[in-house]
Image (cartoon, rainbow, N blue to C red):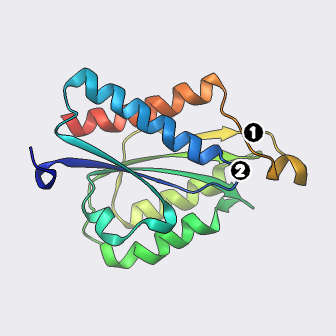
């Protein structure tokens, strides 16, 4: 099957402390595992991009989306928000009905970023395909907030499950 007829899962990530990058990588691994199990490796393409690299055509070419980002000051990180702002109107009414989910790394809450992303995805008329997962790293001091993060086994399993779920949807 040529790439033009493949379905694509787009993983968009941003991270300052490495948590969301690791979440995106683990989600990709989970998606690949599911595609291998279902025999979908030739029909489904996975594309993982840093939010600075995402162009409107990447969004149009994709059939499902997983957003992996940190919450900063009760909202999406500025770089992720800029990515969504930069592409919002160029793809408006072109992504309707496509599935999405998100993995949010947070120091304490994550719900502000979740609400913000849900509003944007509602505007794009995307369909939430799996619950948005918030990974709380309990970082409260400036040093803890800025420190590099490492995923634990539960985080890894949840990220892989999220990627696998979206990949399985594309196989249907």
Q: Position of residue 74 (x, y in %)?
A: 71, 59
Q: Is residue 93 left or right of residue 144?
A: left
At x 62%, y 56%, the residue is: 113
In the image, residue 15 above or below residue 153: below
Between residues 125 and 61, which one lies in front from this camera angle?
A: 61
Q: Position of residue 4 (x, y in %)?
A: 13, 55
Q: Which quadrant is home to the N terminus?
A: top left
What kind of element bears circle 1? loop
User: Does any portion of residue 46 appear in the rendered image?
Assistant: yes
In the rendering, which numbered label is found on residue 163? Answer: none
Q: How many marks?
A: 2
Between residues 114 and 84, which one lies in front from this camera angle?
A: 84
In the image, residue 127 above or below residue 169: below
Q: Position of residue 15 (x, y in %)?
A: 63, 54
At x 28%, y 32%, the residue is: 168
Q: Position of residue 164 (x, y in %)?
A: 37, 31
In the rendering, which numbered label is found on residue 137? Answer: 1
Q: Is residue 52 left or right of residue 34?
A: right
Quarter residue 39 falls in: top left
Q: Which residue is mark 2?
A: 17
Task: Select label 2 or label 1 by which is in front.
Answer: 2
Q: CA distance from mark 2 to mark 1?
A: 11 Å
Quarter residue 60 falls in: bottom left
At x 65%, y 50%, the residue is: 111
In the image, residue 143 above or below residue 60: above
Q: Which quadrant is home to the C terminus?
A: top left
Q: Residues within 10 Å of mark 1 (few under 14, many from 20)?
A: some
Q: Residues within 10 Å of mark 2 (few under 14, many from 20)?
A: some
């Amino acid at each position: 099957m040529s790439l033009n007829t493949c379905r694509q899962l787009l993983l968009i990530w941003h991270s300052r402390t490495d948590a969301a990058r690791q979440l995106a990588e683990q989600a990709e691994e989970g998606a690949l595992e599911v595609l291998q199990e279902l025999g979908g490796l030739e029909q489904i393409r996975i594309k993982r991009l840093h939010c600075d690299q995402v162009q409107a055509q990447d969004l149009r070419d994709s059939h499902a989306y997983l957003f992996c980002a940190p919450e900063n000051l009760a909202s999406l990180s500025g770089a992720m928000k800029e990515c969504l702002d930069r592409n919002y109107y160029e793809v408006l009414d072109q992504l309707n009905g496509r599935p999405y989910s998100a993995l949010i790394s947070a120091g304490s809450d994550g719900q502000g970023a979740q609400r913000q992303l849900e509003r944007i995805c509602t505007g794009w008329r995307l369909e939430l395909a799996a619950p948005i997962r918030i990974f709380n790293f309990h970082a409260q001091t400036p040093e803890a907030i800025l420190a590099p993060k490492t995923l634990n086994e539960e985080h890894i399993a949840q990220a892989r499950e999220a990627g696998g779920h979206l990949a399985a949807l594309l196989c249907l």
